[in-house]
Image: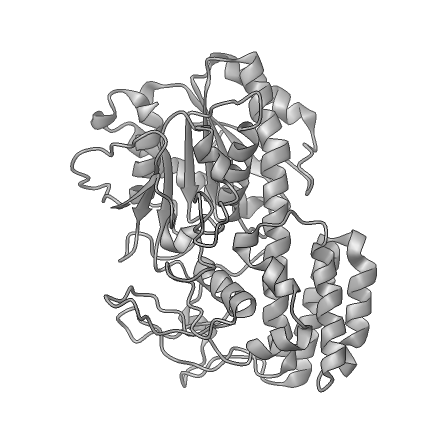
Amino acid sequence: MITDFDFFPLTFDENGKLGNPAQFTALNTRAATATDVIFLAHGFRNNENDATTLYAGILKTFKENLARPEFHGAGNRNVIVAGVYWPSKPFQETFSSSDASGDGSVQAADDELQEMVAVLQQLESMKNMSPEHSAELDQAIALLPEVKNDPDTQDEFVGLVLSILNDTELDVTEGLQQIRAQQGSDLLGKLSTPVILPTVQSDSDQDEGGTLAVGSFIPSTGNGAALSVGSFFGSIFGKIGQFLNLTTWYIMKSRSGSVGATGVAKAVRDLKATHPAIKIHLVGHSLGGRLMAGCAKSLAQPPVLQPASLTLLEAAFSHYGFSANNGAGTPGFFRDVIDKKVVKGPMISTFSFQDTVVGHVYAIASRLADDNVKAIGDANDPFGGIGRNGAQKTVESAAVKLKTAAAPGAPYTFTPGVVTCLDGSGGLIKEHGDVANSDVTYALASAVAMT
């Protein structure tokens, strides 16, 4: 039980296999008397407790909102929750002033040896994530003492690291294909210039920006705009660290997709087979949003199964994910969800210009894949994220301002078949992890109540 909801954990491995079938049995038994099941997925998390804390926060404000009078008794529906737990890697999602020293300089590991140790730790962590690629990563580790001034060694090092992505499903809108086509030394060279990621949206289409290392601290001017700073790391090992962060993200992206398309989709199908009248709601945060989009895409395959709603909270996938054409003739990876009308009811996707986590990942990807000097991951960037910019080049989408739950005015009106992109910029969604607040869950409650 979490926040008065009957809560059932479903724990999947990296391939989407359910670790304990008894977990689904318990969910399936309880579903006999339920009207709705919410499948809820986390993104980057340190452990199960972190994910559970996120779920508890979301469900608390969701329950409060679901009971509001404008939802006409939806709070009396018998809603249960399936909490999806998948093996994601911890990833820094917030940046605070504690990351900076008292004189305003960034507390960075400016000593080269410390940076090398940090890289070694990253590589060891990647071995734990992908033990089947330990041999390649051990070879990469062995090259570290020689990598500093030798482009050939840098090429070999980067090639070994990228080889662990050989089996991942390719999504050309995410930049990996373009990155892998380049020499490793060239990729690392592109990370020499720091990136400035704005945290306020400019009235001009010519936003200022470059790339900043994923995991860097961005000092503020006080009005939300980022100051220009040097790179968090300085040496070749700092650049390698940035590259490894992005590689880790690609690993987790692929993993989340596998869990959604294989494990969660099977659970949804099995549940509906037993309880055909029950309403299924797919909800995911960060890469959990990609997980749930992957689930919906899998449900588009025959026999098509229609979940009642799909809610993406600061999702970490391409802003062209639902597009029929990304501008270069390529449909989005999740286009089937639109074309095959998989979701019966509302499809909503929050985004915020203050989501620097999604912004950083795509700014780095853009710098490496497209040689984009500005590379700020905004709506005009070829490699932007839906959690920062909303759905782009998607005719079947509409951008509206996120309502304030305290005084929402009229309830949302969501159109089936249209991705409603809810803009939380300007303080309604203050950061990547700010998805449990009442404004966000008012939208979720609206989506559930409409079904």
Foreground of the two, 97 or 272: 272
Please tell me which residue is depicted at 77% across the width and 64% down the height of the picture: 137
Number of marks drawn = 0
Image position of 274 with respect to 71: above or below: above
Q: Where does the image place residue 153, in percent across and percent down from the top left?
A: 76, 78
Q: Where does the image place residue 350, in percent across and percent down from the top left?
A: 36, 46
Left or right: residue 191 versus residue 399 is: right
Q: Residue furthest front?
A: 329
Foreground of the two, 217 or 208: 208
Q: Where does the image place residue 257, in percent across and percent down from the top left?
A: 59, 42
Residue 114, picture quadrant: bottom right
Left or right: residue 357 versus residue 187 is: left
Quarter of the figure that contains the C terminus:
top left
Residue 242, picture quadrant: bottom right
Foreground of the two, 395 or 28: 395
Image position of 203 with respect to 428: above or below: below
Please tell me which residue is depicted at 43% across the width and 81% down the height of the picture: 229
